[in-house]
Image: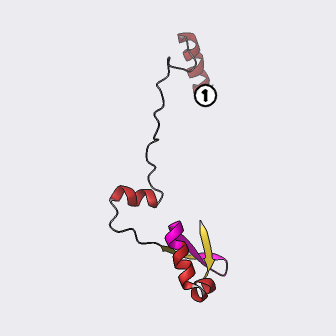
């Protein structure tokens, strides 16, 4: 993420706007603290594209992951399950 100071925005507005257009958004800081976000206009985004831009949605992977050959994980016998349940219950 690109950041600029409030003074840089004031003194070099055209450069900061060009940077926002190239990168997508620029954070403007005041006294070292982020205060504003300058972003380029993208037209009418659909709700999914807007959620992705805001970091609230991640699109699925472009390559498929193959299904496993066999279900993994430990196998438990009934005695093991009984022992685990007794351990979870504790001596109360």
| Quadrant housing the N terminus | bottom right
Residue furthest to the bottom = 11
Find the residue positioned furthest to the right: 32
Image quarter of the C terminus: top right
Q: Write down the quadrant of residue 28 in the picture.
A: bottom right
Image location of residue 84, percent across then percent down = 59, 20
User: Residue placed at 60% from the left, 89% from the top?
Assistant: 11
Q: Which of 48 and 81 is in front in this view?
A: 48
Report the span colored magenta.
20-34
- Secondary structure of the residue carrying tag 1 is loop
Left or right, 25 with respect to 5, comes to left
Image-based side of 90 in relation to 67, left or right:
right
Nearer to us in this view, 15 or 75: 15
Residue 64 placement (x, y as % from top left): 45, 33
Of residues 1 and 80, which is closer to you in this image? 1
Q: Where is 22 relative to 73, above or below?
A: below
Q: How many marks?
A: 1
User: Is 90 drawn above or below residue 36 in the view shown?
Assistant: above
Query: Between 32 and 91, which is closer to the camera in this rendering?
Result: 32
Q: Position of residue 3 (x, y in %)?
A: 61, 72
Query: Where does residue 63 sit, x and y in percent of width and height?
Result: 47, 37
Examine the structure image and report whether residue 23 is included in the region drawn in magenta: yes
Q: Specify how the rendered protein is coloured.
A: secondary structure
Q: Residues within 10 Å of mark 1 (few under 14, many from 20)?
A: few
Q: Would you name the residue on which mark 1 appears?
A: 92
Quadrant of residue 5 within the rendered picture: bottom right
């Amino acid at each position: 993420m690109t950041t600029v100071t409030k003074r840089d925005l004031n003194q070099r507005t055209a450069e900061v706007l060009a940077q926002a257009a190239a990168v997508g958004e620029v954070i403007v800081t005041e006294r070292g603290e982020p205060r504003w976000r300058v972003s380029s206009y993208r037209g009418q985004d659909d709700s999914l594209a807007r959620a992705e831009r805001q970091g609230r949605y991640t699109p699925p992977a472009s390559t498929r992951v193959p299904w496993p050959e066999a279900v993994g994980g430990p196998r438990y016998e009934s005695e093991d399950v009984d022992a685990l349940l007794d351990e979870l219950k504790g001596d109360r």
